[in-house]
Amino acid sequence: MLSSSTFPLAPLVGGILIGLSSLVAMLATGKIAGISGMCSRVLRPKLGDAGWRVAFLLGLVGGSALAFAFVETAAVYRPVRSLAAMAAAGVLVGFGTRLSGGCTSGYGVSGFGLLSKNAMVATAIFVGTGMLTVFLLNRFGAPFGP
């Protein structure tokens, strides 16, 4: 098992890998690597477009599975809310990505990498709203249980 004491640079390496994968996807396809767009295009593929998207998503899920299996401190990132709360959060995130025309990964990772002012503003709003939501849920309770 790996832990933060045996591998203290894990967050830095993880961030670098996320940025590199976004860059490689953009260089290889000319498209922004946003998770919501990838998921929607896998469900409604265009001819010749689904393969790399499926590979990217499998790598995303597979990498997470490997982290949970072999990195001791990954348990910190397991969900702490109920399944109903997580489902409601997923629906709200899906609604937000359609409303804003992109997702946190597309704006926050790819958009920042491109020095997009719109992406920086959108990311600040996402992060601020997320912080406020967590504060309110922890302070006043979650409507869908702990």
Image: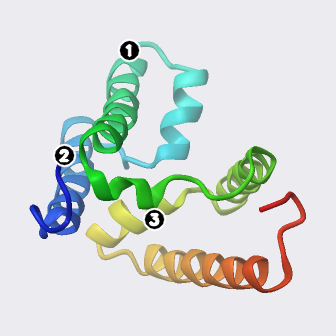
Q: Amino acid at mark 2?
A: Met
Residue that label 3 marks: 107
Q: Secondary structure at mark 2?
A: loop
Q: Secondary structure at mark 3?
A: helix
Q: Quadrant of residue 40?
A: top right
* Label 2 vs 3, first from the N-terminus: 2
- Measure the C-alpha gap from mark 3 to mark 1: 25 Å
Q: Secondary structure at mark 1?
A: loop
- Measure the C-alpha gap from mark 2 to mark 3: 33 Å
- The mark lying in front, picked from 2 and 3, is 2
Q: Amino acid at mark 3?
A: Tyr
Quarter of the figure that contains the C terminus: bottom right
- Measure the C-alpha gap from mark 2 to mark 1: 39 Å
Q: Is residue 14 visible?
A: yes
Q: Position of residue 108 (x, y in %)?
A: 42, 68
Q: Position of residue 106 (x, y in %)?
A: 44, 57
Q: Quadrant of residue 57?
A: top left
Residue that label 1 marks: 48
Residue that label 2 marks: 1
Classify mark 2: residues with Cα within 10 Å, few (<14), some (14-19) or many (20+).
Answer: few
